[in-house]
Image (tube, grey):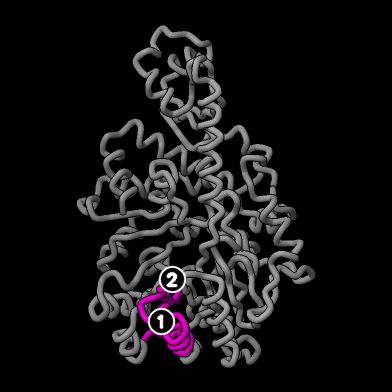
């Protein structure tokens, strides 16, 4: 028997999670792992077939074939990850009516006159998207607060329908919903439009971080969500939750707020180290504190009477990366990075970026040009910065990643490491990206391997 290369990590339960470069995985108790490493057959014979099919061991007579199969699995995985299939993000305005404590965009004030997209650039942007992508195109309208310039949102939709063809594109408006009204509702009724918004807990938690001076941000988003649910349908609005310090001790408020509005899908994430968020020390917390919060949230979901309908999509994505071969629909968990390959952003000023994070870096590190040109003159092949970022994003070669059991399922975030450490690889021992994803994988896999109820819940999420 030949031992094939693999990595392993000890879970909280004492079991070990094993993976190899092709993405195969298995769980072993400590005794079995020791026997595997020592080439002992004392207890392994019962799982030899599983270990062979996962390419963790190879009989001597097929050793070369097993090595070739492992290399072929890695090649197929890299080929899948490298497909150019971006979400096209468009920023009609950087102006915003909120002053959120964790804002990562570096918004512009409402009275600014220099932060709106020039209308004449819209046909050029859509034409560029038509040339770069393939149907169905994914268009996401971002800000600032895009509804500040609802007229431009309308023109973007109409131009997409004209150039890309009705039914050939998805159209999502990422908005606080504070400006949502009957006019926007009426417009959306006759079009295939979806909305994405922030919901950070109950009214106290939400309003403490999503500040709308002179008004109630929570009540605004609640009213708008109810209008969308009632008039457009349950699937027309989705939420994203950024966990603030105010929410850390109140995970139950997040579930209550969602269920009160008839929402059963959650997407939970820690604060991002970009833009204004990077300087708000009062909101800072450790990844250990975040995971204490997340464990409590998971237990609340598991014990809820609504557990059979609730889905937490950040956990679902982590589990899909392991359990669903070929799943690569989430830019953060891709190697090479989803930078450019999975996202392109057309900014209000006409410049194009390989990700939303790249435009944030532009606002913070203005001495460097993080763009890849403008819509009519995108330059990718000769862009040295973009070549460096992508070439540096294969985590299988990163110090600290090459021996990690979660490397085949994890990704690379060069922009976050540039923001926090000044270079695209980053010291993984200091990396918030690494800490977050490694702890999520560890927690979820431990739950999966030790609790039948958790396993059933996570497997359901894998197929949502």
Q: Which residue is mark 1?
A: 165
Instruction: Depth check: give the residue in front, 60 or 357.
Output: 60
The residue positioned 36% from the left and 65% from the top of the image is 202
Estimate how packed mark 2 is, as few (under 14), some (14 to 19) or many (20 or more) residues with alpha carbons within 10 Å: few
Q: Is residue 169 magenta?
A: yes
Estimate how packed mark 1 is, as few (under 14), some (14 to 19) or many (20 or more) residues with alpha carbons within 10 Å: few
Label 2: state its secondary structure.
Answer: loop
The residue positioned 65% from the left and 37% from the top of the image is 400
The magenta region covers 153-181
Look at the image and tell me in which quarter the C terminus lies: bottom left
Q: Earlier in the sequence, mark 1 or mark 2?
A: 2
Q: Is residue 37 above or below residue 331?
A: above
Label 1: state its secondary structure.
Answer: loop
The residue positioned 69% from the left and 70% from the top of the image is 372
Q: Is residue 115 above or below residue 67?
A: below
Q: Is residue 244 magenta?
A: no
Specify the quadrant of the image occupied by residue 258.
bottom left
The residue positioned 70% from the left and 75% from the top of the image is 373
Specify the quadrant of the image occupied by residue 397.
top right
Direction from residue 385 to residue 77 in the image, left or right:
left
Picture mark count:
2
Could you say where residue 102 lies in the image, as x and y percent from the top left?
Answer: 55, 66
Q: Is residue 165 above or below residue 413?
A: below
Q: Which residue is mark 2?
A: 135
- Disc 1 versus disc 2: distance between alpha carbons? 9 Å
């Amino acid at each position: 028997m030949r031992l094939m290369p693999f990595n392993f990590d000890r879970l909280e339960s004492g079991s070990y999670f094993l993976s190899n470069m092709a993405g195969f995985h298995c769980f072993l108790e400590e005794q079995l792992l020791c026997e595997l490493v020592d080439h002992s057959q004392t207890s392994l014979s019962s799982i030899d077939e599983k270990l062979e099919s996962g390419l963790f061991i190879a009989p001597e007579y097929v050793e070369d074939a097993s090595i070739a199969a492992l290399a072929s699995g890695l090649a197929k995985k890299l080929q899948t990850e490298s497909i150019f299939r971006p979400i096209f993000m468009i920023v009609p305005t950087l102006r915003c009516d909120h002053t959120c404590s964790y804002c990562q965009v570096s918004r512009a004030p409402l009275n600014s006159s220099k932060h709106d997209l020039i209308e004449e650039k819209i046909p050029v942007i859509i034409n560029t998207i038509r040339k770069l992508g393939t149907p169905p195109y994914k268009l996401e309208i971002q800000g600032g607060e895009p509804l500040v310039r609802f007229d431009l949102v309308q023109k973007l939709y109409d131009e997409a329908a004209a150039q890309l063809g009705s039914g050939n594109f998805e159209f999502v408006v990422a908005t606080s919903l504070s400006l949502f009204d009957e006019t926007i509702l009426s417009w959306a009724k006759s079009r295939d439009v979806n909305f994405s918004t922030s919901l950070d807990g109950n009214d106290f938690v939400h309003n403490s971080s999503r500040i709308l001076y002179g008004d109630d941000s929570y009540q605004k988003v609640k009213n708008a969500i109810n209008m969308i649910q009632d008039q457009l349908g349950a699937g027309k609005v989705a939420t994203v939750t950024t966990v603030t310090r105010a929410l850390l001790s109140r995970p139950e408020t997040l579930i209550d707020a969602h269920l009160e509005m008839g929402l059963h899908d959650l997407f939970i994430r820690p604060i991002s180290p970009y833009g204004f968020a990077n300087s708000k020390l009062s909101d800072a917390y450790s990844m250990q504190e975040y995971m204490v919060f997340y464990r409590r949230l998971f237990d609340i979901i598991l014990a809820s009477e609504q557990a059979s309908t609730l889905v937490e999509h950040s956990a679902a994505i982590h589990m899909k990366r392991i359990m669903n071969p070929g799943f690569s629909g989430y830019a953060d968990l891709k190697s090479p990075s989803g930078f450019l390959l999975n996202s392109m952003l057309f900014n209000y000023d006409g410049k194009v970026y390989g990700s939303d994070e790249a435009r944030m870096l532009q606002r913070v590190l203005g001495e460097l040009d993080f763009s890849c040109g403008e819509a009519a003159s995108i330059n990718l092949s000769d862009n040295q910065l973009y070549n460096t970022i992508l070439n540096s994003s294969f985590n299988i070669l990163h110090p600290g990643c090459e021996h990690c059991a979660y490397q085949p399922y994890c990704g690379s975030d060069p922009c976050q490491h540039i923001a926090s450490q000044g270079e695209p690889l980053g010291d993984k021992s200091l990396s918030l990206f690494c800490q977050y994803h490694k702890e999520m994988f560890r927690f979820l896999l431990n739950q999966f391997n030790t609790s039948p109820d958790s396993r059933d819940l996570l497997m359901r999420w894998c197929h949502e």
